Amino acid sequence: MKVIANDAIITDAASRGTMQINEFLPLLAHALLESLDLLININGLLTEHVCGIEANKNKCEEFFNASPMIITALLPLGLANTAGRSSSSRPGARAPTAIPGAT
């Protein structure tokens, strides 16, 4: 939470500076260095918890294929082809015939 608070401090301090002179530069530097120090120190602890985690390939593939958001990446293939792929993952969904407002 401290890193998130420091992010808000840095953003606010940077936005209040006037042109080349930023009277909040010491506060900004302190918050930035404190956040870097906290993140560097926690890196080792997080590494211990993350090592050994493996993704379930079948479950990831299932989520990927069921997601209607994948249609965005597939749009270059064409609307009819893409809509057919997306609607097949959702029972009862119908494929659109055109994009509203497209010419």
Image (cartoon, rainbow, N blue to C red):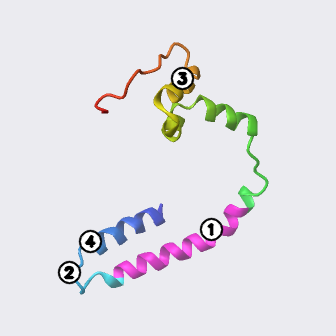
Residue type pointed to by label 2: Thr
31 to 87, vertically: above or below? below
Residue, disc 4: 15
Magenta residues span 27-47
Task: Give the image location of residue 53, x and y in percent.
Answer: 75, 50
Query: Mark number for residue 42?
Result: 1
* Residue type at numbered disc 4: Ser
N-terminal-most mark, 3 or 1: 1
Marks 4 and 2, Cα distance to the nearest angstrom? Answer: 8 Å
Q: Circle 2 is placed at which residue position? A: 18
Q: Residue 48 location, x and y as percent?
A: 74, 61
Magenta-drawn stretch, dominant element (helix, strand or loop): helix
Residue 14, position in %: x, y? Answer: 30, 74
Vertical placement of residue 79 versus 39, above or below: above
Q: Nearer the viewer, mark 3 or mark 2?
A: 3
- The residues bearing labels 3 and 1 have C-alpha atoms spaced at a distance of 46 Å
Query: What type is the residue that disc 3 sits on?
Result: Gly
Q: Quadrant of residue 13?
A: bottom left
Where residue 24 sits in the image (x, y, percent)? Answer: 29, 81
Q: Which of pointers 3 and 4 indicates the residue nearer the eye?
A: 3
Q: Are marks 3 and 2 in contact (CB under 8 Å)?
A: no
- Mark 4 residue crowding within 10 angstroms, few (<14) / some (14–19) / many (20+): few
Of label 4 and label 1, which has the lower sequence position?
4
Report how far apart the C-alphas of labels 1 and 2 lie in the structure.
35 Å
CB contact under 8 Å: marks 1 and 2: no
Question: Up-down: is 52 above or below 13?
Answer: above
In primary-sequence order, the first of circles 3 and 4 is 4
In contact (CB < 8 Å): disc 4 and disc 2: no
Q: Is 70 on the left or on the right of 27, as rendered?
A: right
